[in-house]
Amino acid sequence: MGTLEFVQIGVYLVLLILCVPLLGGYMAKVFVGDKTLLTPIIRPLENGLYRLIGTNPNDEQNWQQYTFALLAFNILGFIILFLLQLFQGVLPLNPAKLPSVEPLLAFNTATSFMTNTNWQAYGGETTVSYLTQMMGLNVQNFVSAATGIAVVIAMTRGLARRSGETIGNFWVDLVRSTLYILLPLSLILAVLLVSQGVVQNFDDYVPATTLSGESQLLPQGPAASQIAIKQLGTNGGGFFNTNSTHPYENPTPLSNFLEMFAILLIPAALTYTYGKMVGSVRQGWVIFAAMLILFIVGLSIMLVSEYQHNSVYDVTGVMEGKETRHGITNSMLWGAATTAASNGSVNAMHSSFAPLTGGIALLNIMLGEIIFGGVGAGLYGMLIFVILTVFLAGLMVGRTPEYLGKKIEAREVKLAITAILLPSASILLFSALASVTDAGLDSRTNMGPHGLTEILYGFSSGAGNNGSAFAGLDASTPFYTILIGIAIWIGRFGIILPALAIAGSMVKKRVAPPSPGTFPTDTPLFIILLISVILIVGALTFFPALSLGPIVEHLLMDAGQTF
């Protein structure tokens, strides 16, 4: 690594830290209903939407009502997107004359985009029309991200309110997340991306002749608007098949930096929003610090692993599978960001990473997408680990555990464990099934430990609502299309439902004044405890599988053996 590469990583992290209080403070104002710079412009549209959907913004919901509204909205979005794909062949804005999407693939894609996963078992420019991209996939990019933000805001109210029954109004949180946060930021980023050469048009595909004399079609389309929200909403996916390696999606070093930065911007800032809403900014910074430490450690291991001497190729710093214009460091920074967040975009082939590099990317997802994580989803996943940490700390000091003055009891711990176990079990059980059946094994590109890593990554990406691909697994078969689709549902709603139930349970509890025996949760010691619990509970769950995959592959690579 050169000096400039270290400088770039430093600039990336410093800008991220500087933006946390700026954007986080703005979002806190949005969700408590305070006036912001955009209020005079957006408030009339906001009120019009409330009248259109028939909701009173002053009427709040208990956790069951909030959950029902969330599920009804998401299921409706799934049905609309599913039907849109089935009938795209006879719908307008289809200049490439693409046929309707096959039903199993349409199910997988609708599931994927509705859950903020954006797992793609298809090539964007060869499968879905402009109309499906805009009215289907792009709409879900906004509302799936807004759903994640709504859940963490509801959970924050449950923890922060002194006592009550309600945790907010889902429709209000959804509308405000979209109008005040996602749309303005996406508009700014889309304009910046267009300035860098990202395509944004409705043109027909352009015939071209390569230097070797071959004919090809250059795909066009409204890409910049979708790329902006796919990064800001931690959706991922690709307008084009090769995702963020495609020069029409990511043409310049500046576009690469902006897209990487957008991935972590909102998830990082939400920690400050959380601190403001619970009445203690320190609580938010503690969570941000834990996320940042895990991110930096993971990125460091990835960089060291990727730059070390490769005994198989007898070179240092392998460029295979990476874009020359991005290089190794930008590929590692993107890989760390996209797997720390639930973002499926890639600017390099993860299957070509060094074994430990790919292993850290895989572990980032397996931990539950809590190292910044998806928009909203990362923070409510981290809060579940916070509750578990407080409970374990209470056991160690011999008193009833409390968080923000509220007692953590058996119900909250059971719900937290459920949220951790459901996606973990789906990853391991589905991977085990794939490892012992012909339908699962036939999709591998590689044998041995690398083949196992391909399978683990596929189900982890689905259950973790990440959406990135290891690029060595053929996931277009019915076996993987169905099972990964099921894992995506479990990974999304298997955490959202316990999180909202925890919010409903905590909001009813009264706040007790702190006492000499109260365990502080805004200190460096708590950061250490929180990271320890994440690694013990999260990482050790998958250690046997990781040992048989990337860890043993790394040892074999050092010995010069491949599969």
Image: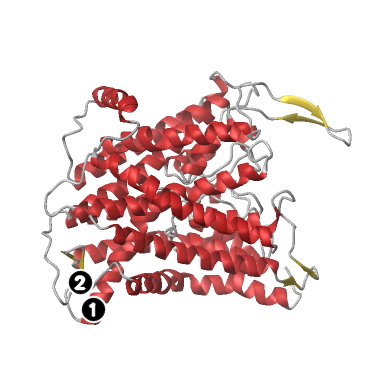
- Label drawn at residue 395: 1
Q: What is the secondary structure assignment of the residue under circle 2?
A: loop
- Residue 51 picture quarter: top left
Along the viewing direction, whichever of 184 and 59 lies nearer the viewer: 184
Q: Please rate how many residues cluster around mark 1, counting C-alpha atoms within 10 Å: few if below 14, some from 14 to 19, many from 20.
A: few
Q: Position of residue 157 (x, y in %)?
A: 22, 50
Q: Name which residue lies at 35% across and 50% down.
A: 493
Q: Please rate how many residues cluster around mark 2, counting C-alpha atoms within 10 Å: few if below 14, some from 14 to 19, many from 20.
A: many
The relative height of residue 145 versus residue 465 in the rendered view (above or below) is above
Q: Amino acid at mark 2?
A: Pro
Q: Amino acid at mark 1?
A: Leu
Q: Position of residue 451 (x, y in %)?
A: 64, 63
Please state if 245 lies on the left or on the right of 500 as rendered: right
Of the image marks 1 and 2, the number of the one nearer the N terminus? 1
The relative height of residue 434 versus residue 448 in the rendered view (above or below) is above
- Residue 68 picture quarter: top left
Q: CA distance from mark 1 to mark 2?
A: 7 Å
Q: Is residue 36 visible?
A: yes
The relative height of residue 31 versus residue 451 in the rendered view (above or below) is above
Contact (Cβ within 8 Å) of mark 1 with mark 2: yes
Q: Name which residue lies at 74% across and 78% down.
A: 559
Please state if 86 lies on the left or on the right of 282 as rendered: right
